[in-house]
Amino acid sequence: MKRALTIAFATLLAFASYAESAPENANEAVSSKPEFPTEETYESGFLSTPLNQAIERGMRSADNEMQFKYGRTVTDFATAPKVGGYFMSGYYYSSQDGAHNGDGFKQKNIRLYVSGSVFKHFNYLVQVQLVNAAFHMKDYWLEWKKYPEFSVKVGQFIRVFGFENPYNPFEYRDGAYALITQKLAAQSDYIGTDNGGGRDQGIQVQGDLFPVGKDQHRLIHYQLMLSNGQTINTGDANGKKDISGTFQVQPIKGFYLALYGWTGDHKANNVTVSRNRYMISAFYDVNEWTARAEYAHSTGHKISDYNPITGEWSGAGKAQGWYATLGMPLNDWLKIWLKYDAYQDDACWGSTRSIYSISPNIQIHKNLWFQPRVGYVHDRTFDDNWMEVSIETGVRF
């Protein structure tokens, strides 16, 4: 493991960087990236772009020139809301025994969202997901973001844990989220019941500090979140709160080193399990060349480890994993992703699942892409090997 991490981090140090300034209001937020890669971005698509332009023209008036004032009767000083959405679909094949050749054709993601700002500095977002018959609220939040050094967000949003977790699926081009992102960032959690897409309900503070260098990039990013710990669209079950956070350094523009931490409890089926996790990460991106590596460790049992008859716990109560990925642009529309991904469900070599994959991303338009993926899986738990093959398409409308 140490050797793999050493190689991954050495690879990261070989590249140089990108990042754009953090947006000042929600209208900018739907079309630009934050300076530190810690938030989802939301673009307009084929249909929503002209619709958003029409809404903006309709709302444009002398209001922007009026004196700034507050009060419950004030109805001006709001940006035009922006709407958007996308869908992803594909064909998925697996040669694993008992997998029945995989999922075949399936929906992966269908999402709709609206964002905007009020009084310039109060940003909001609402996002819903429709997959098959499972309609549900994905995000809803309000954020006061007047200063880059300090902002406050409240609602339901991405949990602070890992560089991969904040990517929305349409913008994520590695082929598949790493196993530690799925299992230890609560996309489909290790404990067995928190499948909230890496989100929770709570309040968060964050900021970017100390402009440095000729480009005045921010040197430090911090983020701290207080949340229920019970996944999305669910109230607190035990009166306790989770705390998660990150401290990040950007020594040169676009090269990020991060430490994440998360501690808390989760209650399900009258069983409470603890989650104490940390992650060490590095991310580097320049001129479409991308390299990223992360290692995560978790202490705490699964819900299924508890025996209600004996009152005893089984299992190791630990899990860990790591990955390294490299994205190589061949031209304006083709980028090849290589990824090594490993996860240990019991934090030992005997439970290691490793995936070696290649994923060409064919971006023929900013709102339309195709991505085939081939992965070789080696699972030490069952001493088994198999192939995974898929081809996905994404359309932003």
Image (cartoon, helix red, strand yellow):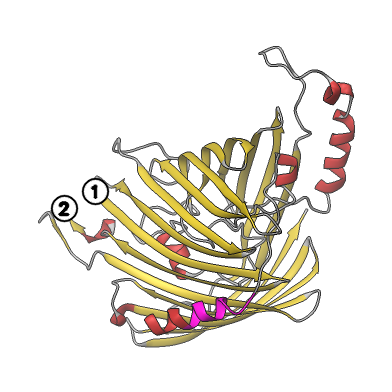
On the image, the x and y values in percent for residue 156 come to 52, 41
The answer to whether the residue labelled 1 contacts the one labelled 2, judged by CB atoms less than 8 Å apart, is: yes
Quick one: SS at disc 2? loop
Please tell me whether residue 115 is drawn above or below residue 188 in the rendered image: above
Please tell me whether residue 249 is drawn above or below residue 53 in the rendered image: below
> Which residue is outermost to the left?
310
On the image, the x and y values in percent for residue 150 come to 55, 39
Please tell me whether residue 242 is drawn above or below residue 246 in the rendered image: above
Question: Which residue is drawn at the image coordinates 64% and 73% (left, top)?
Answer: 290
Please tell me whether residue 23 is drawn above or below residue 396 in the rendered image: above
On the image, the x and y values in percent for residue 10 come to 52, 80
Left or right: where 275 falls relative to 329: left
Of residues 129 and 132, the one nearer the viewer is: 129
On the image, the x and y values in percent for residue 383 come to 34, 87
Quick one: SS at disc 1? strand
Residue 134 seen in the current view = no
Left or right: where 238 falls relative to 165: left
Asked whether 79 falls inside the magenta stretch, the response is no
Q: Which amino acid does label 2 sit on?
A: Pro
Query: In the drawing, what numbered circle is on residue 271?
Result: 1
Q: Give the range drawn in magenta.
A: 7-15
Residue wearing tag 2 = 308
Of residues 121 and 139, the one nearer the viewer is: 121
Of residues 329 and 105, the one nearer the viewer is: 329
The quarter in which the N terminus is drawn is: bottom left
